[in-house]
Image: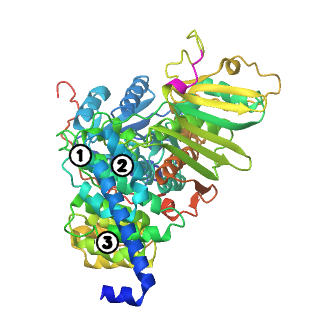
Amino acid sequence: MKRTKQLNRREFLAGAATSAAALSFPYLVPSSALAARGRAGANERLTMAHIGVGGMGGYHLQDMVKRRDRGEVNIAAVCDADENRLANAVKTAGKGVQPYRDYRYILQRKDIDAVVIATPDHWHGVQMVHAAECGKHVYVEKPACCTIEEGKAMVAAARENKISVQVGSQGRSQPEAYLAHRYLVNGNIGHISRVDCFHYPSPADNNPVPDSDPPPELDWDLWLGPLRWRQYNKRYCHGVFRWIMESGGGQIRDRGAHVMSCAMWWMGADGTGPVSIEATGTAPTKGLWDSAILMNVTYTFKNPDWTLTWTQMPNDKLPSAEKRTGKEPGGKISRPGYGAIYRGDKGEFIHWGGDGGTWAEKKAREWKPPVGAEDVYKSPGHKEDWFKGIKTGAKTIMNIEAAVGVANLCVLGNLSFICGRKLRWDPVKQEIVGDEQARRMMGRPQRHPYHL
Amino acid sequence: MYKKLIKAFPAASAVAAASGRAGAAEKQAVDGLIAKLRDKSDKVRAEGLLSAVEVGAPAVKPLAKVMEDDDIEVVRAGKRALWKIVRNVGRPGAGNEKKAVVAKLVGLLGEKQSALVRREALWMLSEIGGDETVEPVAALLSDEEVREDARMVLQRIPGRQSLEALKDGLKNAPMDFRPNIAQSLRQRGLMVRRPASVKLVPTKKTNVKPLKDEGT
């Protein structure tokens, strides 16, 4: 398919005029058509579409409406497989915004520069790759991918189509994440050889229900998308898809994609990976959900040598949260149930959260860098960083390569847990080594026609 | 005949006796597992799950029956137990244990089983099945109820035989299913021009209308 930014302005306007005449809604001129070839102009409004508008997608839409009202962007379209959610999104987005059930209508529109994808995890890979193939820049929710093969396809699609991708591990863009990062890289706790991530347990399905027909507002076939067919069950959606291994993967894939994202960023480990992964845990014994309730995963990294662990532990075992006044850069700690402890040869450092709230221990917040101290990248905000990437070609703070690296940690932790054994991983080839069954599980065949 | 054999080979009678004892123990283990999984108590079913791996291949067929129980939680327990067995025998070096489970799973692909059981068996074979499973899986490409699962499973089983089975499938499948098989062949690295990919072609229209401008 010809990409929007490969069209010259005259071609684009001619095509858009024809298409617009044939359709019943107004087309917008994409910023890329008015600017230098391949990039939106610095002062041009980007034209956005939102795919998945419930839950986190609803937040993104509201956030984008504020940006539109400030004159920063246009919003052209919203999309959801749930008609109720879609109708709400239309109300939120207002006039001039076209609703769609099938995201592929959005990808056909040449006036759209970029898409925000906030669908359930099992859709991220396919939709991001398709958007890239159609020349759209992408903000996609975390975790980036559900399988190793999806991740590889996402990286390849972003590179081949030269699009800017930001993955929604927004913890990297929080003000206290910058302070923590700067504190750690300047050796304040010495050489760090171990990072222990902590999190409260994944929930058990204590209210199981039998399979049933889907509600009339939901297109169940489209919601399932790439996943193999199964009967609808109320406990699949919405939101609770997180506790199903195939569509969400539990806390390790939900919050692991935040907390381990900070760890990989602060340890300078983006682009690397572990050589072995060993997981243990407790699986649910009733209900539909199948993600590990308690879990312990050990990732062993080599050259440089360090250990990363992910532990879902009972609430009474969690580290207690720092007391705060609320005047700190990140304010009060509203989600103390997850974070990580960094263990160096000169001391320890702890942070809580790691997503939209990232809270660094006091000593990092109050540390005054001496002359000559190393500084680190300070994100202007997660979406601002993405817009900068779109307009300048700069690498985003949670670019697709980094995000796939983090998502792979989550995926591999779950694979080790499911298989019940230690896995060996080749971080260069990005392959499981010496275990045929686990190797096959690096990918998952997808249902037609919802595939990479 | 059996008595004659025992007379001729006294050692064989000892083996047969031992094998009989083993068979009885095996039956006891399977029955114990199934009884626990069919129990009404979550706690007892959870205990059953813990012993599934030890029982292994002999439990496969009885577990398929558990998966057709009327109680959804019993169905789920049966499915969980079966997957635990499959994940265990997929470990490196579990050759004979794996072969035994694969053979039992192939036996679950027949029409006598429910679609639920056949689908689960197919996906289990996608993880541990080899060339020996290709023919029975490929036969399901003509079964409308499970053909899409069979197609994906063949895509996942590595090797020449599964690839050839997909190629044959493309030639022989009804027209409406050929795009699916073509997709699998593309995923396996083949260039397939016809039928063309429809992955980017939108098909589903919404009933939700955009907000109208006032006065229009």
**Residue A46: which numbered mark, if any?**
none
Q: Where is residue B180 in the image (x, y as percent from the top left)?
A: 30, 66
Q: Sequence-wise, which precedes: disc 2 or disc 1?
A: 2
How far is the residue under mark 2 from the one under mark 3? 30 Å
Give A414 or A76, whichever is nearer the viewer: A414
Q: Where is residue A416 in the image (x, y as percent from the top left)?
A: 52, 51
Q: What residue type is labelled 3?
A: Val
Q: Residue at x 47, y 44 (%)?
A: A137
| Secondary element type, mark 3 | helix
Q: What residue type is labelled 1?
A: Ile
Residue picked out by circle 3: B137
Neighbours of disc 1 within 10 Å: few (<14), some (14-19), many (20+) = some
* Chain ID of residue with mark 3: B
- Residue stretch in magenta: A316-322
Q: Residue at x 21, y 45 (%)?
A: A211
Q: Sequence-wise, which precedes: disc 2 or disc 3?
A: 2
Q: Is residue A384 above or below residue A320?
A: below
Residue picked out by circle 1: B72
Residue picked out by circle 2: B48
* Chain ID of residue with mark 2: B
